[in-house]
Amino acid sequence: MLEEKKRVAIIGLGVIGGSLGMALMAKGNYVVTGIDRDPVAVHLAREIGAVSAGTTNYLAGIKQADIIVLAIPVGDLAVIARDIAPFIPPDAIVTDVGSTKAEVVSELEDIFSSHFVGGHPMTGSEVSGVRGAEQYLFENAVYVLTPTGRTCPKALRKIQEMVDDTGALSCFLSPEDHDRIVAAVSHLPHFLAVALMNLVADFSEQYPQAFTLAAGGFRDMTRVAASSDIMWRDIFATNHRYIIELSRRFREQLLSLEKLLEQEDLDPLVSFMQRAGHERQKIPIKLKGTFPALFELVVTVPDRPGVIALLTSLLGEKGINISNLEILRVREVEGETIKLGFKTGEEAERAFQVLSKADIAVKVKR
């Protein structure tokens, strides 16, 4: 007997909505309806295989859905939610992909009751709109789910199954803890990038060579300042409390550094920098999100063509999946190495045995 396909309606066919549709369509057991007020976005979504069908009519698109995903800006969520609430199927589950959660979850739980599950995939693209959609955007990315005491366990389970089907890694946080954490690791950095970019823009009026001399570090630090201003306006508006709190704490850090420079007290300054360097090593070697560290191996290999293909084929033949691969350039301790990340300790142990038997220098990353 063929498994009945799950019916998902995605409202908002931007990068996240389009990528979610592509990932679910590729899974093969989903029927995805894309909904967007822009007919061009609907057409493109169908063209790239992100949806089974598309429409600009919200009510027509949701009428048979098992799951409704609100992939629209945070500022529009409550408005659209109230519009569709009277028309959703009785057993349908609603979720969102908003970058802030406390205010959003409170509002949408009032509208949808226990059938709402808050969500936030910690991934994205610098290309806006459905043209930036990628089938593997969610692969190995952290996908935060924010259940509360009002959340129906069955609804949460269904949304987690959908998340798993995209290849993302589920992480459960309260809405408040989510907002505190992302304020520190995402929202404040964007806040600072905007401020730094505008500071140097003002500075460049007196010194036109400033942007010419801007090196990779400056570009990396300010890259996010080019993101959608409307999206970030809504993020700042709905998480302003935690962003302000952390901005003030950041200013205290700057003042401490300034005092050390004024006093020409270089030893504490070096200690300050050393602590930063040490703490940075705790960031998981993942390209997406902030999920707890993978089980990692460090492999030392000759610098020659085909060496990465050799590693992946050796492990692939044994059915061992590499969740993350990072090529390290010259490191003081490790030299030229490759880090391999695995989701489980059992996979990492099997990989260690396979590589060791192939006479490849490998060690466990602690």
Image: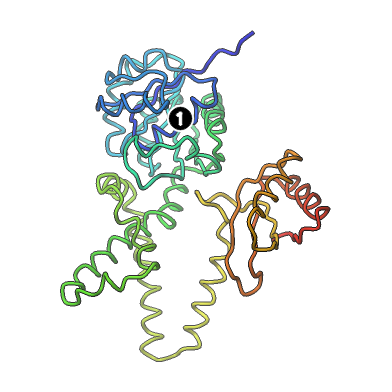
The image shows residue 86 at horizontal and vertical percentages of 32, 16
Asked whether residue 360 is in view, the answer is yes
Can residue 366 be seen here? The reply is no
Look at the picture and state if 342 lies above or below 252: above
Examine the rendered structure and indicate whether residue 155 appears above or below residue 299. Answer: above
Asked which quadrant contains residue 315, the reply is top right
Most extreme residue toward the right is 357
Left or right: residue 314 compared with residue 185: right
Q: Amino acid at mark 1?
A: Met
**What is the tally of numbered marks visible in this picture?**
1
Look at the picture and state if 170 lies above or below 190.
Answer: above
Q: Quadrant of the N terminus?
A: top right
Using the image as rendered, state which of residue 66 and residue 90 is in the foreground.
66
Question: Is label 1 in a helix, a strand or a loop?
Answer: helix
The image position of residue 299, as x and y in percent, is: 70, 59
Residue linked to disc 1: 22
Q: Is residue 209 left or right of residue 242?
A: left
Quadrant housing the C terminus: bottom right
Corner quadrant of residue 282:
bottom right
Left or right, residue 80 beside residue 295: left
In the rendered image, residue 134, in percent from the top left (x then y), is placed at 44, 37
Q: Pick out the residue farthest to the bottom.
A: 264
Q: In the rendering, at what x and y percent does residue 16 appear?
A: 40, 37
- Furthest toward the left, the residue is 205
Name which residue lies at 44% across and 56% down: 185
Identify which residue, 94 or 17, lies in the foreground. Answer: 17
